[in-house]
Image (cartoon, rainbow, N blue to C red):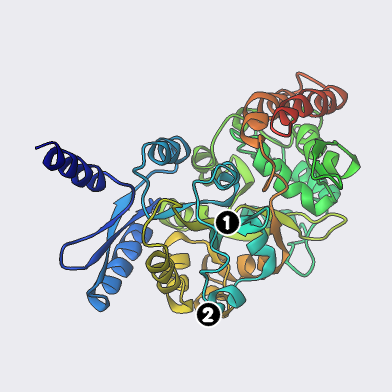
């Protein structure tokens, strides 16, 4: 009797294990958690799952809808509870703690040669931690300036291109020229100021996080790191060319004012074009411009969207095969168009649909070669540093509550105390 009870418990526990499983008939079921949220991109993901399932009788994939708003905590809970999906959609700047914590599979020996060679090394660096690779970067989003084309044309300012972008000084002067009569040259939606500031600062040579020979990371706020914060601060508090009321806003919150002519330009992620194309009033003329350039040209940091495999998944090879299918060049283009973002794959980037002038696709695609891993990409403790130190410090600096010296002190002194706990 005891043996029977023991065997029943084993069967029950096996049924509660993480990820997918294997049925009695030998068929494997994998769980794919997607964070796609736009109607177009959700449908594309589901279509690709259906296409895979139609062609693979022995390995079926179940589509699971996740949310960007809660993904970190949700994944942590599912990892610790042994209930993680087999295939995990996330962003590269969320992977470090999961990779170091042993929750994600090292894909180094599992990735097909085609996929490894198609995605540039600079993109693979965003998902590489220690000696392993813990995700496949597949979609990326540069930051651009979305501008009121009519207002810029009437002002007579030089229109920047990827070949001849504005400098940060030129950008500041132009936003001042476009201001007046209750209107602003630019609206900075900086509810989440840290990633926007750090990623754009790469163009001016900003790095902020410095790793020594022993691998220890320290924060140093140097000359290149000052350029972007000082530009935003001066536009808001000195020139009055940037709206102070949008500093606590998200990107979508600025669109009504943009459509209404209150702001000539809004710095936004590339995917916001979808909302603008659908919500802009009839006849509203808008265009996509490259972000300003600094000492390092158009360089900017990105944290690509990624696909990872749970370490506890019993079917890692099958999960990677599904990822390889999803990221075939033609499928990667479909995913990029659905999300209004750029693919990382070199073959996908050649697709004519990504080089049309309509909705600014060509401008964004021209920026792909300038995208680099976000400065905080592999920094352990970054989420705590961002939430407890950097976010309030940047918010206060941009509003004029503190000066540049106090910003530096808080980022360095308080920030290094946080990071030190993760590097003992």
Q: Is residue 423 above or below residue 330?
A: above
Q: Is residue 338 left or right of residue 349?
A: left
Q: Which mark is residue 237?
A: none
- Residue 136 in the image, given as x and y percentages of width and height: 53, 62
Q: In the rendered image, which residue does mark 2 sit on?
A: 351
Q: Dot 1, crowdedness within 10 Å: few (<14), some or many (≥20)?
A: many
1 or 2: tag closer to the N-terminus: 1
Residue drawn at x 36%, y 46% is 66
Q: Is residue 342 left or right of residue 395?
A: left
The quadrant of the rendering that contains the C terminus is top right
Element under disc 2? loop
Q: How many marks?
A: 2
The quadrant of the rendering that contains the N terminus is top left
Q: Is residue 157 above or below residue 162?
A: above
Q: Is residue 366 above or below residue 260?
A: below
Residue 20, visible in the rendered structure: yes
- Residue 78 in the image, given as x and y percentages of width and height: 38, 40
Q: In the rendered image, which residue does mark 1 sit on?
A: 304
Task: Name the residue furthest top.
Answer: 401
- Residue 355 in the image, given as x and y percentages of width and height: 57, 76
The answer to whether mark 1 and mark 2 are in CB contact below 8 A is no
Q: Is residue 246 left or right of residue 15?
A: right
Q: Dot 2, crowdedness within 10 Å: few (<14), some or many (≥20)?
A: few
- Residue 336 in the image, given as x and y percentages of width and height: 48, 66
């Amino acid at each position: 009797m005891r043996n029977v009870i023991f065997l029943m418990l084993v069967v029950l526990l096996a049924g509660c294990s993480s990820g997918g499983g294997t049925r009695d008939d030998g068929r494997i079921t994998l769980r794919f958690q997607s964070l796609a949220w736009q109607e177009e991109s959700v449908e594309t993901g589901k279509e690709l799952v259906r296409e895979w399932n139609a062609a693979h009788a022995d390995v079926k994939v179940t589509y699971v809808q996740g949310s960007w708003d809660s993904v970190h905590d949700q994944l942590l809970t599912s990892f610790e509870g042994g209930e993680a999906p087999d295939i995990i959609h996330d962003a590269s700047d969320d992977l470090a703690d999961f990779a170091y914590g042993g929750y994600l599979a090292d894909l180094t020996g599992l990735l097909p040669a085609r996929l490894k060679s198609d995605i540039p090394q600079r993109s693979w660096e965003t998902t590489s931690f220690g000696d392993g690779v813990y995700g496949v970067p597949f979609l990326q989003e540069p930051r651009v300036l979305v501008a009121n084309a009519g207002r810029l044309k009437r002002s007579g300012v030089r229109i920047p291109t990827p070949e001849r972008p504005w400098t940060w000084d030129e950008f500041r002067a132009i936003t001042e020229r476009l201001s007046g009569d209750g209107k602003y040259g630019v609206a900075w939606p900086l509810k989440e100021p840290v990633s926007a500031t750090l990623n754009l600062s790469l163009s001016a040579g900003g790095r902020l996080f410095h790793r020594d020979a022993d691998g220890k990371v320290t924060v140093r706020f140097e000359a290149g790191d000052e350029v972007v914060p000082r530009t935003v601060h001066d536009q808001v508090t000195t020139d009055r060319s940037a709206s102070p009321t949008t500093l606590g806003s998200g990107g979508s919150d600025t669109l009504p004012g943009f459509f209404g002519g209150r702001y000539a330009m809004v710095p936004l992620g590339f995917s916001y074009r979808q909302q603008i194309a659908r919500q802009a009033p009839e006849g509203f003329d808008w265009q996509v411009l490259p972000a300003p350039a600094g000492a390092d040209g158009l360089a900017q940091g990105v944290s690509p969207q990624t696909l990872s495999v749970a370490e506890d998944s019993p079917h890692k090879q099958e999960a990677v095969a599904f990822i390889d299918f999803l990221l075939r060049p033609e499928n990667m283009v479909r995913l990029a168009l659905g999300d209004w973002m750029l693919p990382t794959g070199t073959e996908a980037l050649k697709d004519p649909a990504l080089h049309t002038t309509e909705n600014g696709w060509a401008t964004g695609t021209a920026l792909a070669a300038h995208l680099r891993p976000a400065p905080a990409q592999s920094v352990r403790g970054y989420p705590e540093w961002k939430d407890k130190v950097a976010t309030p410090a940047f918010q206060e600096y941009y509003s004029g509550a503190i000066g540049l010296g106090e910003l530096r002190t808080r980022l360095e002194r308080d920030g290094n105390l946080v990071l030190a706990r993760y590097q003992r």
